Image: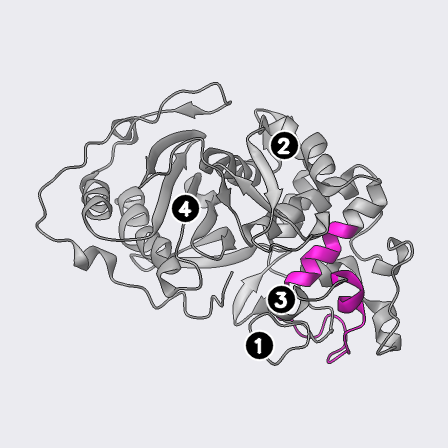
C-alpha cells in the first residue's frame, strides 16, 4: 500500500453526483454455497438514496473500482462488480496480505509453533543470521518489531533513499539475507516505518517454525476453516519468488470472511479459528506510521460522521484493495480496484465517509 498520509484528503464524492439517467437497479446478493448469508437493503430500515446514487455514479463515471461488498450483521447486503470482474474473480490483494499474515502469526502462536510475540527473531530463524553491518541491536529485534514495522533496520518503502525500500530488495537474489544485512538506523521499537520486508520475514518465521510453506500452513489453519478454496499465491515479478514473499489472490467474498473473522473476535460460524486474545491484541494500536495508528499489520483508521468518530480496523493494498471492519456498526466493507500507484485508490474512503456511514448511522 502506498503512503496513507494523504488519505483524509478525499474527493467530496457525494458532490460529484450528476443528473445522469438512473440505470442502477439494486438486487439482493445471491445465496451461494460458501457459508455466507445474504439479505436485502430493505431489511436494514435505512434510506438507500445515497447508495443508489453511488452505484449509478460508478456505472456512468470512469473509475477503477472492481468490486464493492458490504456485510452488516453477518449478512452480505451489497455486492457489486464492475467491468469484467465477477464473484469468482481472484484479486491481487497486494499489502492487504500483510493483515492476513498477522492472523496467521496469531494462529502459529495459538498452535504452539511460536512461543511469544516478544521472542527474538533469531530464536526461529534456523540458519539465517546477519553477515554484514553487524550490530548488537540486531539481536534485540523481536517478532513484535516485525509486525509493528519497527525493527530499526534501514527499511522504509515510502523513502526511495532507504536501502531496504521494497523495490530495491525485489531486485536482490536473496531477499531475507539482504534484509538482515541492512544497517541499523534506530533502536528496535523506537520508530515505525512502512517496511514490507518485515512482513516477509514474519511469514518466513511462521514457515520455519511450523515446517510448512505459508500456502500449506494458511490452507490448513485458516482457509479450510473459513471454507475458502478459490485463492492463490503469486507476485507481479517475473523472477522466482520465495514462498514467504508471495501475495494472496482472493475473491471479494473471501476477503469479507477475513473481515468477519476480525469482527467476530476470531470466530467463523461459531468456530474459533484464531484466539480472541490475538484479535484484540493485533488490532489495537501499538505504534504510529505517518501519524496513523497501527497494530500488528492492521491500521486503525478513523472516520468522522456527524461529529462522531468511528474507528475501522483496516487492511489496505495498493490499487484499492481494502478490508474495513467497523465493530461499533457490526459492519465489514470490502473494496477491490485497479488504481495502482494512484491517489484514485483512496476513493473507497470517500465512499465510506460520504455514502455508507451516513446511511447506516442516520438517527444514531
In this view, 98 is above or below 112? below
Q: Which mark identifies residue 166? A: 3
Magenta stretch: give its range: 175-204
Q: Residue 15's spot in the image, x, y percent?
A: 18, 59
Q: Which mark identifies residue 223? A: 2
What is the secondary structure assignment of the residue under circle 2? helix
What is the secondary structure assignment of the residue under circle 4? strand
Q: Which mark identifies residue 335? A: 4
What is the secondary structure assignment of the residue under circle 3? helix
Q: Residue at 70% x, 61% y: name it.
A: 198
Q: CA distance from mark 1 to mark 4?
A: 27 Å
Q: Residue at label 1?
A: 159
Which of marks 3 and 4 precedes in the sequence?
A: 3
Q: Nearer the viewer, residue 304 or 333?
A: 333
Q: Judge from the rendering whether residue 21 lies leftward or rightward of residue 135; answer left or right.
A: left
Q: CA distance from mark 3 to mark 2?
A: 27 Å
Mark 2 surroundings within 10 Å by alpha-carbon count, few (fewer than 14), some (14 through 19), many (20 or more) = many
Q: Residue 232's spot in the image, x, y percent?
A: 59, 38
Q: Residue at 24% x, 62% y: name it.
A: 12
Which is closer to the viewer, label 3 or label 1? Answer: 3
Q: Judge from the rendering whether residue 247 lies leftward or rightward of residue 72; answer left or right.
A: right
Amino acid at each position: 500500500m502506498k503512503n496513507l498520509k494523504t488519505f483524509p484528503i478525499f474527493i467530496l464524492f457525494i458532490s460529484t453526483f450528476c443528473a445522469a439517467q438512473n440505470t442502477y437497479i439494486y438486487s439482493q446478493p445471491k445465496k451461494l454455497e460458501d457459508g455466507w448469508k445474504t439479505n436485502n437493503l430493505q431489511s436494514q430500515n435505512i434510506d438507500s438514496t445515497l447508495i443508489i446514487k453511488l452505484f449509478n455514479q460508478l456505472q456512468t463515471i470512469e473509475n477503477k473500482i472492481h468490486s464493492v461488498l458490504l456485510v452488516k450483521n453477518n449478512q452480505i447486503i451489497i455486492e457489486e462488480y464492475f467491468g469484467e470482474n465477477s464473484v469468482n474473480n481472484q484479486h491481487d490483494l497486494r499489502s492487504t496480505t500483510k493483515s492476513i499474515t498477522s492472523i496467521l502469526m496469531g494462529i502459529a502462536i495459538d498452535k504452539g509453533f511460536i512461543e511469544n510475540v516478544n521472542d527474538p527473531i533469531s530464536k526461529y530463524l534456523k540458519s539465517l543470521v546477519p553477515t554484514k553491518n553487524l550490530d548488537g541491536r540486531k539481536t534485540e529485534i523481536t517478532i513484535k518489531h516485525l509486525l509493528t514495522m519497527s525493527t530499526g533496520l534501514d527499511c522504509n518503502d515510502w523513502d526511495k533513499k532507504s536501502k531496504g525500500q521494497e523495490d530495491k530488495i525485489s531486485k536482490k537474489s536473496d531477499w531475507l539475507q539482504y534484509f538482515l544485512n541492512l544497517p541499523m538506523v534506530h533502536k528496535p521499537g523506537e520508530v515505525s516505518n512502512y517496511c514490507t520486508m518485515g512482513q516477509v520475514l514474519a511469514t518466513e518465521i511462521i514457515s520455519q517454525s511450523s515446517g510448512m510453506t505459508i500456502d500449506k500452513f494458511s490452507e490448513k489453519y485458516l482457509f479450510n476453516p473459513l471454507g475458502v478454496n478459490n485463492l492463490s499465491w503469486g507476485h507481479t515479478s517475473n523472477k522466482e519468488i520465495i514462498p514467504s514473499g508471495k501475495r494472496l489472490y482472493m475473491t471479494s467474498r473471501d476477503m469479507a470472511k477475513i473481515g468477519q473473522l476480525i469482527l467476530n473476535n476470531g470466530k467463523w460460524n461459531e468456530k474459533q479459528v484464531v484466539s480472541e486474545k490475538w484479535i484484540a491484541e493485533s488490532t489495537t494500536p501499538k505504534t504510529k506510521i505517518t501519524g496513523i495508528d497501527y497494530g500488528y499489520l492492521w491500521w486503525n483508521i478513523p472516520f468522522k460522521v456527524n461529529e462522531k468518530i468511528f474507528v475501522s480496523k483496516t487492511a489496505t493494498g495498493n490499487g484499492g484493495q481494502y478490508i474495513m471492519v467497523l465493530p461499533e456498526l457490526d459492519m465489514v466493507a470490502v473494496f477491490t480496484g485497479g488504481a495502482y500507484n494512484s491517489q484514485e485508490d483512496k476513493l473507497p474512503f470517500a465512499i465510506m465517509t460520504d455514502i455508507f456511514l451516513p446511511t447506516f448511522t442516520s438517527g444514531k
